Image (cartoon, coloured by chain):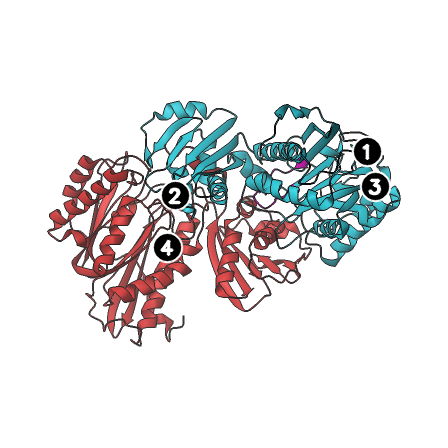
Chain colours: A cyan, B red
């Protein structure tokens, strides 16, 4: 997407958009630190969401989807870590509904304006007494603690604030997310929240969100596993008082680029903070027959355990990249593929270029590794992000509950 | 498949079937030990093969497929480890053809009766002088060294001999294989060879092989990566002089069961010897709508990195099994799934049964872990095999070439 003037979009220090409030508290769902919080808008906000494709969708995810789909509106979202409220049957559903009602009562708003998000261990009942006590502690502040309270195995909060000008009005978009393991296309054990003061309808927001998630969150993979709880929720409360952001608004593309800037940053933050990851891996595919195939091949490479272990080992064993490409059913010029790692061309016409291993290995010490592939089968492209496979990934996942 | 009398099939110590010879030698493709060898039948044998689905099929694999498909016959197969002769362009093809011709010359048979199999590092030219010298060393013996010479990261040879009686004639089926990493459905970096003295036509053999591979080798996964070199080749030289094994031969099912016994054993051997594996994992799914969906769900569970790391950690975190099931698009009774680990039921009606973790953890110390799943959506079943994900897997794959 093109914008006339890139400098209309500015990355800023963390800031809540106009009319949004937040808070967090320690409810005792995790041993230490804040594990619960909320976002609140002073007026009902237009809302949109994207949800896990896992067949066992957790109760809070199902409830939030139902709530948003009523009329694309939310005024608050309550969140907790430490317990996913997933695979808890009827009890899980009624607990999620009770949590929604408790927040509505405390904020004196309708329950169908409250979204719910839970993340943590699956199959343990939500401790409702702790949840209730936690909700009673929450206030309306401009604190940033919530971005930390939703974390599980993440090593740091992931946030992004972008400011832009829409019809001469300053607009803020602020996103934050959590996600480290079970990260894979079509959502993962990730929660993402985006708030903005822009004026935009819920249906327009849904269309923009669905498209942008396909290009960002659905192009990251940590371990190929998708979770039961994933969602990305957006709230737009209109307090910037710009002209409504319809397709025909000349500044729509500025907003869309700013929005994608936020989501792409968060997606890359998740990939780079994958469980045990030591490196962020970006794969750029060109020469694809179409965009979908470019995306497919990029994801196949970044998702291959063998490629991921090779990058951890700082080894330029390009045969594994060829294997990952060949496993897909994307169109490929079998004798015409090129592969570069960190700008060093290792494969030309599907054969090794004879570059010295040591030269590649040296660049693989970088924290960011870029793999460029040309399939030579068309003119479309695709990009995906992931991380290396490390001893620490195994350690974290061998003892998640212990 | 049913046989009237299971005791017609007997597992035996390793033995080559009548009329088969073998040998191995150190050609210098690997630093130590034998790295090359062959199988030879005293008469041309009926032959069949199944090959990798990777788009970058290695030259030896393509050549062997072409050779077998000429008229379903082979008299010899030459094999090497240490070099996969893959992604070597025109040079790779002419080297594979030259290797085939060298063996034909040495054995004084036609080149189109010689199969070729290579495994090892991708993208390095085959050292033809070493190959030539190696072939000149090979003899016709009853040695078992070949089963070791084809190994790469495997920790031990994988062999199986089964004897059965077909129309009152003793028949032997002997298989061996290699494979440890890049193991995934639709072939992997695995080579499998089955020899038998039974009388069976090439086309019947092909049909039996394709069906049996779907139930065995295509149901194992180590790391989700498929290789460029995989194949399973069968040779039947007819020296047992039984009645031809057609569909209508009353003893056909005995042979088919014996054949599946060999392949299933080898498949499980590969899964249990997955790179760095400490445990063999068997997943049995029942209650599937159809067999294909049962197979799909079994593979999804056994292939999940999170499930694999959990088993390594000896942790009964069944939520990960539910996630793996939910990621598939197989029919599932969302509120009616059961899951057991090592016979202990952890999930009933898609909810935890409240079993004490310690009880499950204790059984996860076993070398073999069995996961039973009931999808409650039908009456079909499926089975898959894999292994745990360990520190050693990462170590092996971070430094394969170093």
Foreground of the two, B161 or A372: A372
Have a look at marks 1 and 2 and say if they share a chain. Answer: yes
The relative height of residue B8 versus residue B188 in the rendered view (above or below) is below
Circles 3 and 2: CB distance less than 8 Å?
Answer: no
Q: Chain of mark 1?
A: A
Q: Residue at x 49, y 54 (%)?
A: B299
Magenta-highlighted residues? A177-190
Q: Chain of mark 4?
A: B
Residue A343 appears left or right of A161: left
Foreground of the two, B141 or A166: A166
The residue pinned by badge 2 equals A332
Foreground of the two, A17 or B53: A17
- Cα distance in 3D space between marks 1 and 4: 65 Å
Q: To which quarter of the image does residue A216 belong?
A: top right
The residue pinned by badge 3 equals A135
Q: Quadrant of the N terminus of chain B?
A: bottom left
The residue pinned by badge 4 equals B266
Disc 2 element: loop
Check residue A183 for magenta coloring: yes
Residue B68: percent from the left, percent from the top? Answer: 24, 56
The residue pinned by badge 1 equals A19
In front: mark 3 or mark 2? 2
Residue B179 appears left or right of B203: right
Q: Chain of mark 2?
A: A
Circles 1 and 2: CB distance less than 8 Å?
Answer: no
Task: Indicate which disc, 1 or 2, sits on the residue closer to the N terminus.
Answer: 1
In front: mark 1 or mark 3? 1
């Amino acid at each position: 997407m093109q914008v006339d003037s890139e400098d209309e979009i500015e990355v800023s220090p963390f800031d809540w958009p106009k009319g949004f409030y937040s808070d967090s508290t320690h409810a005792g769902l995790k041993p230490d630190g804040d594990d619960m919080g909320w976002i609140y808008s002073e007026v009902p906000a237009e809302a949109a969401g994207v949800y896990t494709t896992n067949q066992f969708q957790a109760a809070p995810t199902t409830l939030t989807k139902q709530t948003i789909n009523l009329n694309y509106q939310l005024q608050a979202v309550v969140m907790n870590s430490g317990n996913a409220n997933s695979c808890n049957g009827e009890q899980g559903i009624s607990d999620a509904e009770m949590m929604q009602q408790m927040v509505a009562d405390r904020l004196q708003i309708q329950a169908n304006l409250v979204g719910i998000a839970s993340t943590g261990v699956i199959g343990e009942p939500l401790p409702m007494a702790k949840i209730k006590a936690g909700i009673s502690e929450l206030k309306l502040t401009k604190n940033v603690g919530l971005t930390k309270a939703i974390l599980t195995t993440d090593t740091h909060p992931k946030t992004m604030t972008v400011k832009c000008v829409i019809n001469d009005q300053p607009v803020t978009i602020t996103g934050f997310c959590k996600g480290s393991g079970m990260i894979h296309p079509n959502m993962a054990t990730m929660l993402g929240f985006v708030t903005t003061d822009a004026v935009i309808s819920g249906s327009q927001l849904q269309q923009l969100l669905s498209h942008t998630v396909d290009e960002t969150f659905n192009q990251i993979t940590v371990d190929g596993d998708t979770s039961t709880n994933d969602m990305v929720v957006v709230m737009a409360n209109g307090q910037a008082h710009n002209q409504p952001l319809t397709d025909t608004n000349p500044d729509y593309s500025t907003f869309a680029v700013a929005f994608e800037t936020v989501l792409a940053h968060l997606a890359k933050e998740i990939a780079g903070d994958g469980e045990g990851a030591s490196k962020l891996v970006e794969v750029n595919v060109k020469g694809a027959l179409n965009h979908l195939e470019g995306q497919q091949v990029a994801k196949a490479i970044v998702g291959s355990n063998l490629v991921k272990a090779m990058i951890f080992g700082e080894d330029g064993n390009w045969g594994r990249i060829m294997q990952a490409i060949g496993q897909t059913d994307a169109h490929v010029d079998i004798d015409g593929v090129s592969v570069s790692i960190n700008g060093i061309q290792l494969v030309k016409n599907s054969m090794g270029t004879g570059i010295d291993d040591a030269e590649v290995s040296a660049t693989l010490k970088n924290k960011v590794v870029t793999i460029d592939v040309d399939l030579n089968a068309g003119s479309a492209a695709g990009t995906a992000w992931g991380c290396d496979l490390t001893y620490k990934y195994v350690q974290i996942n061998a003892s998640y509950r212990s």
